[in-house]
Amino acid sequence: MAMMVFGVILVSEGLLQFTCLISGKASSVLISGGSNVPHMIKDPELGYRPNPARPEHDRKGFRNLFVPEEVDIVALGDSQTYGTGVPPESVWPQQLAKLSDLTAYNMAYAGYGPTHSYILLDEAIALHPKLVIEAFYAGNDLYDSYCHVYYRDQLTWLKSAEEASQRQIREAEEDERLDKRISRLWSVAYPPRNTSSPKDQTTSHTIVRQWFSAHSRLYGLLRAVRRIIRRALTVHDKQEADRRWESQKQYARERKQYCYVYEDDQFRTILTPDYRLKALDHEDPRILEGKNISFNAIEALRERTQAENIGFIVLLIPTKELVFKELVLRHPERMSSELQELIEKEETFWAETKEFLDRHSINWLDALPALRQCLQEGNQPYQMTQDGHPSAVGHEAIAKTVLAGIRNAGIKLKR
């Protein structure tokens, strides 16, 4: 009996190994390390890129089933487009493909900004797209673009040439590095992740598990099934959702200087205005430099795509705080000064962004109206925690915005 079971396991493993060799889709699901596999790997130009060995990543490391020979649309951006917190099929590029007869490839990743997109553009062009979409996020793209140029020493031609600006930047950096400042604020506003054991603790059990995770496709299949079950339980277990909410709310209320708890009969979530404000504070010369770098990188993206006869659109993605503005204003007495200032600065930032894009004849789409429409219809487009990433509902709203924009502009994408 034991030999029969062992034989079935060997045959199953062999069939799965062969399937991975001939199917990119199967490979992306089954050739997947577990949580012990790093989420990113080093890259000389990007700084880092997603790890192809992770679950749900293709051979280039991006969050797709496979790498196509050619595609209609390539989406560039950060974690708002990568799809942190939702299954890959729920992310807006994939939902866009489902809503249309178009194909879409997602090249976004957490911490990327317009400068990273510019570096990735050669890889995007190699897929022969008809349209490239740059998803521009107000929450941290200015900060990420600044850090990429100044700390990674990439695309230095995007730096301001004005000595006065450079002097102000140096003085601000001497006071406190921007990356350390943002990281410090993030660590206060967001609960620490649960770590069940020290990272440096290695046992024979973990060594064996790591080996099977890296080499066994049957092990990968079991992991994929477990992920599906966990997602289903997370979606449908209201009691667990309520428990998580109470825990998150307690954490936020203990840090009310940094967090804003919103809760009514329909919606509940936690806003982090102080953290977002620092990443959008144009009084900080580094954030102002990050804005100029981002704008110039976007213009360079348009010029490159135009030279290749590829369409180009900038998708404007707001912060969760701005999306919830109208609901928060129902209780003006609870409005914190940080949240009010953030909303004012972000609205000013988007007005400047649209003016810049219009002046340079760059097509753009605004996701804000569709995300607010979700709230008006009683659907929550964001996670209920401090997480500022859209839920599956939010991604669907963004996908519909993009599809409507493509159709209204009369962009022809089919070959």
Image (cartoon, rainbow, N blue to C red):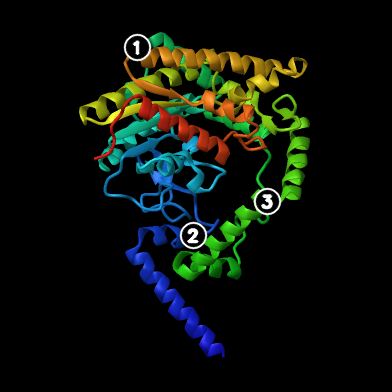
Instruction: State the separation of the CA atoms marked 3 and 1.
Output: 48 Å
Using the image, tell me which numbered label, if any, was put on residue 33: 2
Image quadrant where residue 160 sits: top left
Nearest the camera: 394 or 334? 394
Q: Which residue is mark 1?
A: 359
Please identify, in this view, whether the residue under mark 2 or under mark 3 is nearer the observer.
3
Upstream in sequence: badge 2 or badge 3: 2
Q: Between residues 210 and 112, which one lies in front from this camera angle?
A: 112
Q: Which mark is drawn over residue 236? A: 3
The residue at the point 57 percent across, 57 percent down is 227
Q: Height in image: 217 above or below 174? A: below
Q: Residue flagged by tag 1: what amino acid is it?
A: Arg
Q: So how many labels did they put on this image?
A: 3
Q: Is residue 345 above or below residue 96?
A: above
| Location of residue 257 by image quarter | top right
Mark before the other along the chain sequence, 1 or 2:
2
Q: Measured from the top left, where is residue 44 in percent x and y?
A: 35, 41
Pointer 2: residues within 10 angstroms few (<14), some, or many (20+)? many
x and y, in percent, of residue 277 in the image: 59, 21
Q: Secondary structure at mark 1?
A: helix
Q: Is any atom of residue 139 visible in this view? A: no
Q: Choose top left, top right, bottom left or bottom right for residue 248.
A: top right
Q: Are marks 1 and 2 in contact (CB under 8 Å)?
A: no
Amino acid identity at mark 2: Gly
Image quadrant where one finds the N terminus: bottom right
Q: Residues within 10 Å of mark 1 (few under 14, many from 20)?
A: few
**Quadrant into which the C terminus falls:** top left
Helix, strand or loop status at disc 3: helix
Nearer the observer, disc 3 or disc 1? Answer: 3
Which secondary structure lies at badge 2? loop
